Image (cartoon, helix red, strand yellow):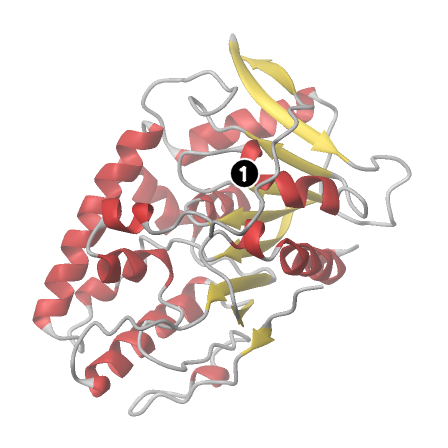
Amino acid sequence: MATGRSTPPLQPPHRRPLHRRPRLLLGAVGAGVLLGFALSVVGAGGPEAWLAGRGPRSEIPIPPYEARGRSVEIDGRGVYLDCRGPRTPPPAGQPTVLLEAGFGTGAASWGFVLDGAAEFARVCAWDRPGLGRSEPRGRHTPAEALDDLWRALAAAGERGPFVAAAHSFGGVYARILGAEHPDEVRGLLLIDAYYPDVGIEADPALPADFRERFRHSLEDTAAMLAAGEDLDWTATLAELRAATPFSGPAILLSVEPRVRAFDPDPAVNAVIVAAFEASLASMLPGGRIEIVPNTGHLMQYEQPDLVMARIRELLELTRG
């Protein structure tokens, strides 16, 4: 089984040591570490270049998705839901796992994980409005899309509690889902997630030219995401603000550090990393981060055993 490695606590210079912040243990091992989707887009030269470089490696076999789900009617629209695994009798108090896909995709992106996780848990994947097999609903917000999911789960007889495993842009949806249903959503697994509300573009400790580049990248990426999923982006950011912080257990998986220097001065890069970590610590105070070796952004394809192991771990953390 593939394994990851947790990073040691970071003690950035001139800042309070991060391991003293509430339970979020983050590590810095070079420029660009733990910067997630947002800074990754900056380093790639923009959203189009980022997407072009993030396909699975050619040697990684991508399993064909077997559509065994069904369309659930919500307000006259079909919402595609695919739930697998034991429903009765479940392990005592074990939550159902909700799989939230990355940008522009849905249940089909979980080909390795869906059946594997269904061997030890009840697992549900779905297609968001206008994606895959789900019908569009017009301009909407993540909370409105997630209302479709919640009602589809109820109509299909699926009951909580839940944990959410989310890849990339799906992290936005998972965090909002946790805020919308705090008594039912017990924990989050965020797989190389995107944090558009990280806020470091306003940090005066960072160089002005970096903050300007980062702000432009956020704007360009927001336009791409909003157009691709028909989202009201202003409302999306408002929902994220209302969803923060998520105080339950959270496991954050991150790719290894790469040659991704944002400034020729290593000291400036250290400040960028520290600013991002400090923001994450306040957004997810009940979380921990793990650097995963030998993987790219599409971790559920390249390291499915690790993803399933962390789902198991999250289930144990939240059981009962």
Toward the top, the furthest residue is 76
In this orientation, which residue lies closer to the viewer: 307 or 258?
Answer: 258
Q: Quadrant of the N terminus?
A: bottom right
Q: Amino acid at mark 1?
A: Ser
Residue at figure coordinates x 25%, y 66% from the top left:
200
Q: Residues within 10 Å of mark 1 (few under 14, many from 20)?
A: many
Toward the front, the furthest residue is 59
Q: Secondary structure at mark 1?
A: helix
Residue at figure coordinates x 50%, y 49% from the top left:
167
Q: Quadrant of residue 37?
A: bottom left
Toward the bottom, the furthest residue is 13
* Rendered position, 171 above or below 64: below
Task: Locate residue 261, reporting x and y percent.
Answer: 24, 74
Position of residue 292 in the picture relative to residue 307 (left or right): left
In this orientation, which residue lies closer to the viewer: 3 or 139?
Answer: 3
Residue at figure coordinates x 60%, y 33% from the top left:
64
Q: Quadrant of residue 307?
A: bottom right
Task: Locate residue 228, reporting x and y percent.
Answer: 32, 31
Task: Locate residue 113, reporting x and y percent.
Answer: 66, 45
Task: Locate residue 65, reporting x and y percent.
Answer: 61, 31
To which residue does mark 1 refer?
Answer: 109
* Rendered position, 6 above or below 155: below
* Rendered position, 177 above or below 292: above
Judge whether residue 231 can be spotted in this image. no
Residue at figure coordinates x 46%, y 16% from the top left:
135
Position of residue 230 in the picture relative to residue 7 (left or right): left
Q: In this figure, what is the number of numbered marks?
A: 1
Toward the left, the furthest residue is 209
Q: Quadrant of the C terminus?
A: bottom right
Judge whether residue 12 can be spotted in this image. yes
